[in-house]
Amino acid sequence: MKQGALSEITVIDLTRVLAGPYCSMLLADLGANIIKIEMPKTGDDSRAHYPMVNGESAYYMNLNRNKRSVTLNLKTQEGKALLKELVKKADILIENYRPGVMEKLGLGYDTLKEINPGLVYGCVSGFGHYGPYKDRAGYDIIGQAMGGLMSTTGWPGGEPTRSGTAMSDVMAGVSLAVGVLAAYISKRKTGKGQLVDVALVDSIVSALEIINQIYLVTGRNPERIGNRYEASYPYDSFRAKDGSLVIGAGNDKLFNLMAEVMNMPELPNDERFKSNPLRVENNASLKAIVESWLKDYTIDEAVDMLLAKGVPAGPINTIERVTKDPHIAVAREMFVEIEHPKAGKMKITGNQIKLSETPVQFDRPAPLLGQHNREVLSELLGIEGAQYDALEAQGVF
Protein backbone atom coordinates (compact mmCIF):
# COMPACT_ATOMS: atom_id res chain seq x y z
CA MET A 1 0.00 0.00 0.00
CA LYS A 2 1.41 3.39 -1.00
CA GLN A 3 2.06 6.01 1.62
CA GLY A 4 -0.05 9.14 1.38
CA ALA A 5 1.30 12.46 0.19
CA LEU A 6 1.31 13.82 3.77
CA SER A 7 2.50 10.67 5.55
CA GLU A 8 5.45 12.52 7.11
CA ILE A 9 3.18 14.98 8.94
CA THR A 10 1.82 14.49 12.47
CA VAL A 11 -1.19 16.61 13.40
CA ILE A 12 -2.65 17.15 16.87
CA ASP A 13 -6.34 17.77 16.24
CA LEU A 14 -8.26 19.53 19.02
CA THR A 15 -11.21 20.42 16.80
CA ARG A 16 -14.78 19.28 16.93
CA VAL A 17 -18.02 19.29 14.93
CA LEU A 18 -17.34 20.56 11.38
CA ALA A 19 -14.91 23.32 10.28
CA GLY A 20 -11.85 21.92 12.05
CA PRO A 21 -12.67 18.23 11.50
CA TYR A 22 -13.25 18.93 7.79
CA CYS A 23 -9.71 20.34 7.63
CA SER A 24 -8.18 17.38 9.44
CA MET A 25 -10.29 14.98 7.36
CA LEU A 26 -8.67 16.35 4.19
CA LEU A 27 -5.21 16.03 5.76
CA ALA A 28 -5.97 12.53 7.04
CA ASP A 29 -7.23 11.31 3.67
CA LEU A 30 -4.00 12.59 2.16
CA GLY A 31 -1.99 10.47 4.59
CA ALA A 32 -1.25 12.72 7.58
CA ASN A 33 -1.05 11.09 11.01
CA ILE A 34 -4.03 12.70 12.74
CA ILE A 35 -4.27 12.34 16.51
CA LYS A 36 -7.71 13.56 17.49
CA ILE A 37 -7.83 14.74 21.10
CA GLU A 38 -11.30 14.41 22.64
CA MET A 39 -12.83 15.03 26.05
CA PRO A 40 -13.16 11.84 28.12
CA LYS A 41 -16.65 10.29 28.27
CA THR A 42 -18.32 12.73 25.83
CA GLY A 43 -15.84 13.35 23.02
CA ASP A 44 -16.54 15.49 19.98
CA ASP A 45 -20.05 17.03 20.17
CA SER A 46 -20.83 15.58 16.76
CA ARG A 47 -20.71 12.03 18.16
CA ALA A 48 -24.32 12.78 19.15
CA HIS A 49 -25.36 14.29 15.79
CA TYR A 50 -28.09 12.84 13.56
CA PRO A 51 -28.29 10.43 11.78
CA MET A 52 -27.24 7.49 13.97
CA VAL A 53 -26.25 3.97 12.88
CA ASN A 54 -26.14 1.38 15.65
CA GLY A 55 -25.59 4.15 18.17
CA GLU A 56 -22.80 5.82 16.17
CA SER A 57 -23.18 9.17 14.40
CA ALA A 58 -22.86 9.04 10.61
CA TYR A 59 -22.03 12.77 10.78
CA TYR A 60 -19.02 12.00 12.99
CA MET A 61 -18.00 8.88 11.09
CA ASN A 62 -17.85 10.70 7.75
CA LEU A 63 -15.71 13.59 9.01
CA ASN A 64 -13.36 11.59 11.21
CA ARG A 65 -12.26 8.64 9.09
CA ASN A 66 -8.51 7.96 8.93
CA LYS A 67 -7.93 9.50 12.39
CA ARG A 68 -6.96 8.08 15.79
CA SER A 69 -8.83 9.12 18.95
CA VAL A 70 -7.10 9.92 22.22
CA THR A 71 -9.04 11.20 25.21
CA LEU A 72 -7.36 13.83 27.39
CA ASN A 73 -8.85 15.94 30.15
CA LEU A 74 -7.18 19.27 29.46
CA LYS A 75 -8.54 20.72 32.69
CA THR A 76 -6.12 18.53 34.64
CA GLN A 77 -2.45 19.36 35.00
CA GLU A 78 -1.56 15.84 33.88
CA GLY A 79 -3.69 16.19 30.75
CA LYS A 80 -2.06 19.50 29.86
CA ALA A 81 1.39 18.03 30.45
CA LEU A 82 0.64 15.11 28.13
CA LEU A 83 -0.62 17.43 25.42
CA LYS A 84 2.59 19.46 25.67
CA GLU A 85 4.60 16.26 25.29
CA LEU A 86 2.58 15.34 22.20
CA VAL A 87 3.15 18.84 20.80
CA LYS A 88 6.89 18.22 20.93
CA LYS A 89 6.34 15.35 18.46
CA ALA A 90 3.90 17.22 16.22
CA ASP A 91 4.26 19.28 13.05
CA ILE A 92 0.83 20.89 13.17
CA LEU A 93 -1.80 21.54 15.84
CA ILE A 94 -5.31 22.68 14.95
CA GLU A 95 -8.08 23.89 17.26
CA ASN A 96 -11.46 25.59 16.93
CA TYR A 97 -12.13 26.95 20.39
CA ARG A 98 -13.27 30.52 20.87
CA PRO A 99 -10.28 32.90 20.91
CA GLY A 100 -8.80 33.02 24.39
CA VAL A 101 -9.89 29.55 25.55
CA MET A 102 -6.58 27.85 24.79
CA GLU A 103 -4.73 30.72 26.46
CA LYS A 104 -6.83 30.27 29.62
CA LEU A 105 -5.85 26.59 29.61
CA GLY A 106 -2.20 27.60 29.33
CA LEU A 107 -2.03 25.98 25.89
CA GLY A 108 -2.13 28.97 23.54
CA TYR A 109 0.23 29.48 20.63
CA ASP A 110 2.68 31.65 22.57
CA THR A 111 3.10 28.86 25.12
CA LEU A 112 3.28 25.96 22.68
CA LYS A 113 5.77 27.63 20.32
CA GLU A 114 8.24 27.77 23.22
CA ILE A 115 7.92 23.99 23.50
CA ASN A 116 8.13 23.44 19.73
CA PRO A 117 9.38 26.48 17.75
CA GLY A 118 8.58 24.68 14.48
CA LEU A 119 4.94 24.10 15.39
CA VAL A 120 2.32 25.24 12.89
CA TYR A 121 -0.65 26.28 15.01
CA GLY A 122 -3.90 26.49 13.07
CA CYS A 123 -7.04 27.94 14.60
CA VAL A 124 -10.49 28.39 13.09
CA SER A 125 -13.25 30.44 14.73
CA GLY A 126 -16.28 32.47 13.79
CA PHE A 127 -14.57 35.84 13.44
CA GLY A 128 -10.84 35.19 13.85
CA HIS A 129 -8.42 35.89 16.69
CA TYR A 130 -8.36 39.67 16.37
CA GLY A 131 -10.86 42.39 15.56
CA PRO A 132 -13.87 43.77 17.45
CA TYR A 133 -15.99 40.63 16.93
CA LYS A 134 -13.36 38.07 17.95
CA ASP A 135 -15.14 37.04 21.16
CA ARG A 136 -18.47 36.32 19.49
CA ALA A 137 -19.61 32.73 19.07
CA GLY A 138 -19.39 31.56 15.48
CA TYR A 139 -21.66 29.05 13.82
CA ASP A 140 -22.13 28.27 10.15
CA ILE A 141 -25.43 30.13 9.83
CA ILE A 142 -23.83 33.23 11.36
CA GLY A 143 -20.93 33.01 8.91
CA GLN A 144 -23.34 32.72 5.97
CA ALA A 145 -25.45 35.61 7.28
CA MET A 146 -22.71 38.07 8.20
CA GLY A 147 -20.44 37.17 5.28
CA GLY A 148 -23.17 38.14 2.79
CA LEU A 149 -24.03 34.73 1.34
CA MET A 150 -27.59 34.58 2.67
CA SER A 151 -28.44 38.04 1.35
CA THR A 152 -27.77 36.86 -2.20
CA THR A 153 -29.22 33.34 -1.95
CA GLY A 154 -32.88 32.70 -2.71
CA TRP A 155 -35.52 34.13 -5.02
CA PRO A 156 -36.34 37.78 -5.73
CA GLY A 157 -38.74 39.04 -3.09
CA GLY A 158 -38.13 35.96 -0.93
CA GLU A 159 -36.38 35.54 2.37
CA PRO A 160 -32.57 35.45 2.60
CA THR A 161 -31.67 31.76 2.43
CA ARG A 162 -29.01 29.63 4.04
CA SER A 163 -27.15 27.32 1.66
CA GLY A 164 -28.39 23.73 1.94
CA THR A 165 -25.14 22.69 3.62
CA ALA A 166 -22.75 24.36 6.07
CA MET A 167 -20.74 26.28 3.49
CA SER A 168 -18.98 28.67 5.89
CA ASP A 169 -17.75 25.71 7.96
CA VAL A 170 -16.63 23.80 4.87
CA MET A 171 -14.95 26.84 3.28
CA ALA A 172 -13.18 27.59 6.57
CA GLY A 173 -12.05 23.97 6.81
CA VAL A 174 -10.58 24.05 3.31
CA SER A 175 -8.96 27.42 4.04
CA LEU A 176 -7.39 26.09 7.23
CA ALA A 177 -6.02 23.06 5.37
CA VAL A 178 -4.42 25.31 2.75
CA GLY A 179 -3.09 27.65 5.44
CA VAL A 180 -1.46 25.02 7.63
CA LEU A 181 0.11 23.26 4.66
CA ALA A 182 1.52 26.59 3.40
CA ALA A 183 2.89 27.29 6.87
CA TYR A 184 4.34 23.78 7.04
CA ILE A 185 6.18 24.29 3.73
CA SER A 186 7.53 27.59 5.08
CA LYS A 187 8.63 25.79 8.26
CA ARG A 188 10.49 23.23 6.13
CA LYS A 189 12.51 26.10 4.66
CA THR A 190 13.02 28.24 7.77
CA GLY A 191 12.56 25.87 10.72
CA LYS A 192 10.07 28.32 12.20
CA GLY A 193 6.40 27.61 12.71
CA GLN A 194 3.62 30.18 12.77
CA LEU A 195 0.02 30.90 13.70
CA VAL A 196 -2.62 30.32 11.02
CA ASP A 197 -5.82 32.24 11.85
CA VAL A 198 -8.95 31.41 9.82
CA ALA A 199 -12.47 32.79 10.32
CA LEU A 200 -15.79 31.42 9.06
CA VAL A 201 -16.96 34.90 8.07
CA ASP A 202 -13.72 35.70 6.19
CA SER A 203 -14.00 32.40 4.31
CA ILE A 204 -17.50 33.24 3.09
CA VAL A 205 -16.50 36.79 2.12
CA SER A 206 -13.64 35.38 0.04
CA ALA A 207 -15.95 32.85 -1.63
CA LEU A 208 -18.40 35.53 -2.79
CA GLU A 209 -15.96 36.64 -5.54
CA ILE A 210 -18.07 38.39 -8.25
CA ILE A 211 -20.79 39.31 -5.75
CA ASN A 212 -18.34 41.51 -3.86
CA GLN A 213 -16.93 43.01 -7.04
CA ILE A 214 -20.35 44.07 -8.28
CA TYR A 215 -20.80 46.29 -5.26
CA LEU A 216 -17.18 47.47 -5.13
CA VAL A 217 -17.13 48.46 -8.80
CA THR A 218 -20.70 49.62 -9.45
CA GLY A 219 -22.06 50.54 -6.03
CA ARG A 220 -25.06 48.27 -6.62
CA ASN A 221 -25.97 45.99 -3.73
CA PRO A 222 -26.38 42.47 -5.20
CA GLU A 223 -29.74 40.92 -4.36
CA ARG A 224 -31.33 37.50 -4.53
CA ILE A 225 -31.69 36.43 -8.15
CA GLY A 226 -32.63 32.75 -7.90
CA ASN A 227 -30.38 30.34 -9.78
CA ARG A 228 -29.00 32.65 -12.42
CA TYR A 229 -25.49 34.10 -12.36
CA GLU A 230 -24.71 37.80 -12.17
CA ALA A 231 -21.83 37.60 -14.64
CA SER A 232 -23.24 35.74 -17.65
CA TYR A 233 -26.44 34.44 -19.24
CA PRO A 234 -27.97 31.97 -20.00
CA TYR A 235 -26.48 30.45 -16.84
CA ASP A 236 -29.54 29.38 -14.89
CA SER A 237 -32.09 26.68 -14.15
CA PHE A 238 -34.86 26.15 -16.72
CA ARG A 239 -38.15 24.28 -16.60
CA ALA A 240 -38.62 21.34 -18.98
CA LYS A 241 -41.59 18.99 -19.47
CA ASP A 242 -40.88 16.85 -16.39
CA GLY A 243 -38.79 19.09 -14.11
CA SER A 244 -35.81 21.41 -14.18
CA LEU A 245 -32.33 21.34 -15.61
CA VAL A 246 -29.42 23.77 -15.69
CA ILE A 247 -27.74 25.30 -18.73
CA GLY A 248 -24.41 27.10 -18.62
CA ALA A 249 -24.03 28.84 -21.98
CA GLY A 250 -21.71 31.43 -20.49
CA ASN A 251 -20.20 32.98 -23.63
CA ASP A 252 -21.13 33.98 -27.20
CA LYS A 253 -19.89 30.74 -28.78
CA LEU A 254 -21.93 28.57 -26.43
CA PHE A 255 -24.99 30.78 -26.85
CA ASN A 256 -24.74 30.45 -30.62
CA LEU A 257 -24.53 26.66 -30.29
CA MET A 258 -27.51 26.67 -27.94
CA ALA A 259 -29.52 28.67 -30.49
CA GLU A 260 -28.71 26.02 -33.10
CA VAL A 261 -29.97 23.26 -30.77
CA MET A 262 -33.17 25.28 -30.28
CA ASN A 263 -33.47 25.67 -34.07
CA MET A 264 -33.50 29.44 -33.55
CA PRO A 265 -30.37 30.62 -35.41
CA GLU A 266 -31.74 34.17 -35.43
CA LEU A 267 -31.56 34.43 -31.63
CA PRO A 268 -27.91 35.63 -31.36
CA ASN A 269 -28.74 38.51 -33.71
CA ASP A 270 -31.65 39.71 -31.60
CA GLU A 271 -30.74 43.18 -30.31
CA ARG A 272 -31.54 42.05 -26.75
CA PHE A 273 -29.13 39.12 -26.85
CA LYS A 274 -26.21 40.17 -29.10
CA SER A 275 -23.69 40.25 -26.26
CA ASN A 276 -23.30 38.70 -22.84
CA PRO A 277 -23.97 41.98 -20.94
CA LEU A 278 -27.19 42.41 -22.96
CA ARG A 279 -28.24 38.83 -22.20
CA VAL A 280 -27.65 39.43 -18.50
CA GLU A 281 -29.71 42.63 -18.69
CA ASN A 282 -32.54 40.88 -20.60
CA ASN A 283 -32.35 37.57 -18.77
CA ALA A 284 -36.10 37.33 -18.08
CA SER A 285 -37.01 37.60 -21.76
CA LEU A 286 -34.40 35.04 -22.75
CA LYS A 287 -35.47 32.63 -20.02
CA ALA A 288 -39.06 32.74 -21.28
CA ILE A 289 -37.89 31.86 -24.80
CA VAL A 290 -35.74 28.97 -23.58
CA GLU A 291 -38.51 27.56 -21.41
CA SER A 292 -41.00 27.84 -24.27
CA TRP A 293 -38.66 25.59 -26.27
CA LEU A 294 -38.07 23.19 -23.36
CA LYS A 295 -41.76 22.56 -22.66
CA ASP A 296 -41.81 19.86 -25.35
CA TYR A 297 -38.81 17.95 -23.99
CA THR A 298 -37.98 15.94 -20.89
CA ILE A 299 -34.95 16.85 -18.80
CA ASP A 300 -32.89 13.98 -20.19
CA GLU A 301 -33.87 14.69 -23.80
CA ALA A 302 -32.91 18.36 -23.47
CA VAL A 303 -29.65 17.64 -21.68
CA ASP A 304 -28.65 15.07 -24.29
CA MET A 305 -29.37 17.47 -27.19
CA LEU A 306 -27.41 20.29 -25.57
CA LEU A 307 -24.44 18.12 -24.63
CA ALA A 308 -24.31 16.64 -28.13
CA LYS A 309 -23.75 20.15 -29.46
CA GLY A 310 -21.18 21.01 -26.78
CA VAL A 311 -23.42 23.20 -24.61
CA PRO A 312 -22.87 22.62 -20.86
CA ALA A 313 -26.06 21.31 -19.27
CA GLY A 314 -27.14 18.89 -16.58
CA PRO A 315 -30.08 17.60 -14.57
CA ILE A 316 -30.73 18.94 -11.08
CA ASN A 317 -29.98 15.72 -9.25
CA THR A 318 -31.46 14.61 -5.98
CA ILE A 319 -28.87 13.23 -3.55
CA GLU A 320 -30.18 9.75 -4.37
CA ARG A 321 -29.35 10.32 -8.03
CA VAL A 322 -25.89 11.65 -7.13
CA THR A 323 -25.08 8.53 -5.09
CA LYS A 324 -26.03 6.32 -8.05
CA ASP A 325 -24.47 8.36 -10.83
CA PRO A 326 -22.00 6.24 -12.85
CA HIS A 327 -19.53 9.10 -13.22
CA ILE A 328 -19.72 10.74 -9.79
CA ALA A 329 -20.33 7.73 -7.58
CA VAL A 330 -18.50 5.01 -9.50
CA ALA A 331 -15.79 6.40 -11.78
CA ARG A 332 -14.85 9.31 -9.48
CA GLU A 333 -15.36 7.28 -6.29
CA MET A 334 -17.17 10.04 -4.44
CA PHE A 335 -18.89 7.48 -2.20
CA VAL A 336 -16.79 4.75 -0.61
CA GLU A 337 -17.63 1.79 1.59
CA ILE A 338 -15.98 1.33 4.96
CA GLU A 339 -16.56 -1.10 7.81
CA HIS A 340 -16.95 0.45 11.24
CA PRO A 341 -16.56 -1.74 14.36
CA LYS A 342 -20.00 -0.71 15.67
CA ALA A 343 -21.90 0.73 12.71
CA GLY A 344 -20.87 -2.08 10.37
CA LYS A 345 -20.60 -1.66 6.61
CA MET A 346 -21.64 1.79 5.47
CA LYS A 347 -20.91 4.35 2.78
CA ILE A 348 -19.29 7.71 3.43
CA THR A 349 -18.48 10.62 1.14
CA GLY A 350 -15.21 10.22 -0.75
CA ASN A 351 -12.48 12.78 -1.26
CA GLN A 352 -12.53 15.32 -4.09
CA ILE A 353 -8.73 15.44 -4.46
CA LYS A 354 -7.34 12.93 -6.95
CA LEU A 355 -3.56 12.36 -6.86
CA SER A 356 -1.90 10.14 -9.47
CA GLU A 357 1.09 8.89 -7.43
CA THR A 358 -0.14 9.07 -3.82
CA PRO A 359 -3.88 8.51 -4.08
CA VAL A 360 -6.23 9.15 -1.21
CA GLN A 361 -6.86 6.04 0.88
CA PHE A 362 -9.45 5.13 3.48
CA ASP A 363 -7.42 2.95 5.84
CA ARG A 364 -9.34 3.52 9.05
CA PRO A 365 -12.99 4.02 9.91
CA ALA A 366 -13.74 6.84 12.34
CA PRO A 367 -12.41 5.89 15.78
CA LEU A 368 -14.38 4.93 18.83
CA LEU A 369 -13.91 7.41 21.66
CA GLY A 370 -10.43 6.93 23.14
CA GLN A 371 -9.83 3.89 20.96
CA HIS A 372 -6.15 4.71 20.45
CA ASN A 373 -5.16 5.98 23.90
CA ARG A 374 -2.72 3.20 24.67
CA GLU A 375 -1.45 2.91 21.09
CA VAL A 376 -0.64 6.61 20.59
CA LEU A 377 0.78 7.28 24.06
CA SER A 378 3.01 4.23 23.80
CA GLU A 379 4.08 5.01 20.24
CA LEU A 380 4.85 8.72 20.72
CA LEU A 381 5.59 9.10 24.44
CA GLY A 382 6.55 5.63 25.62
CA ILE A 383 3.75 5.64 28.22
CA GLU A 384 2.47 2.16 28.93
CA GLY A 385 1.86 -0.40 31.64
CA ALA A 386 1.69 0.88 35.21
CA GLN A 387 2.37 4.47 34.17
CA TYR A 388 -0.62 4.44 31.83
CA ASP A 389 -2.83 2.75 34.41
CA ALA A 390 -1.94 5.37 37.02
CA LEU A 391 -2.85 8.25 34.69
CA GLU A 392 -6.11 6.52 33.80
CA ALA A 393 -6.96 6.14 37.49
CA GLN A 394 -6.45 9.88 37.92
CA GLY A 395 -9.12 10.62 35.30
CA VAL A 396 -6.68 11.99 32.71
CA PHE A 397 -8.20 9.86 29.94
Image (tube, helix red, strand yellow):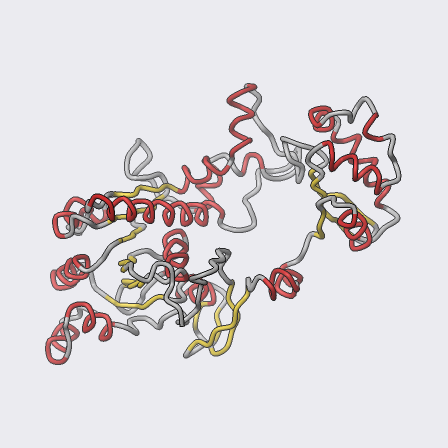
Q: Residue at x 80, y 30 (%)?
A: 285
Identity of the residue drawn at 42% across and 48% down: 174
Relative to 375, does residue 147 appear above or below in the rendering? above
Residue 216 versus residue 298 in the image, above or below: above
The residue located at (84%, 43%) in the rendering is 261
- Quadrant where the image shows the N terminus: bottom left
Q: Give the left or right position of residue 316, taking residue 162 as reference.
A: right
Q: Does residue 374 lie above or below 324 as drawn?
A: below
| Front-lying residue, 37 or 162 | 37
278 left or right, relative to 202: right
Q: Nearer the viewer, residue 269 or 230?
A: 269
* Residue 328 sits in quarter: bottom right
Quadrant in the rendering for residue 221: top right
Residue 100 image offset from top left, x and y in percent: 23, 44
Using residue 229 as the reference point, say whether residue 335 is left or right of it: left
User: In the figure, 256 relative to 324: above or below?
Assistant: above
- Residue 290, percent across and down? 81, 39
Residue 391, x across and y down, in percent: 13, 72
